[in-house]
Amino acid sequence: MLVIDLRKKTSKELIIIEEKSRAELFALRFQLALGNLEKTHKIKKLRILIARILTILSERKLKGEKINRHFKVDLSKNFKEIEKETKRMILKRKNKLINTNKKLQNDDLVSKDQEILKNLSNIENKEAKKIVLEPIKKNENESKTKEITKENKK
């Protein structure tokens, strides 16, 4: 809200806006502490708004206007809205965590599948080596036995 707009409002309206802003600021700080706050810039904007309102009220007080800060502001609607926003943020965060977990599980499954395929290809390679190398080894063994028998005959 611009300062020009704030200056047009009455002192009572300014006090109401200030109280609502303070309630919202409290809720945002609470969300920040819980880790549910995504739009952290709102905290700074609310602090600036409250400071502007207090500045305008103090200017009016210095000019001689009587400012009655002792009336009750109904913040129940504000708190309900803040509670709804907090619940929405919690659900959004929960869904994000669930999706992340699903993605990680899928990645784990893919990596496990790749590992299984590697193992299978290693096994297939070993089996292929056995098939190829067994006859060669047999031939080598037979040739060695032939050489031994030839030497024994001499």
Image (cartoon, grey):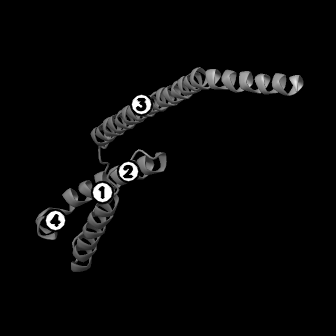
Return the residue at label 3: 98
**Alpha carbon distance from label 2 to label 4:** 23 Å
Mark earlier in primary sequence (1, 3): 1
Mark 1–mark 2 CB contact (< 8 Å)? yes
Residue 69 in sight here? no
Mark earlier in primary sequence (2, 4): 4
User: Residue, x 46% and y 29% (percent of image)?
Assistant: 105
Q: Which mark is residue 28?
A: 2
Mark 3–mark 4 CB contact (< 8 Å)? no
Residue 54 coordinates in the image, percent (x, y): 29, 68
**On the rendered image, what quadrant is the C terminus found in?**
top right
Q: Choose mark 2 or mark 4, whichever is in front.
A: 2
**Alpha carbon distance from label 3 to label 2:** 24 Å
Amino acid on which the number 1 mark rests in the picture: Lys
Mark earlier in primary sequence (3, 2): 2
**On the rendered image, what quadrant is the N terminus found in?**
bottom left
Identify whether 69 is placed above or below 83.
below
Q: Observer-nearest residue: 60 or 4?
A: 4
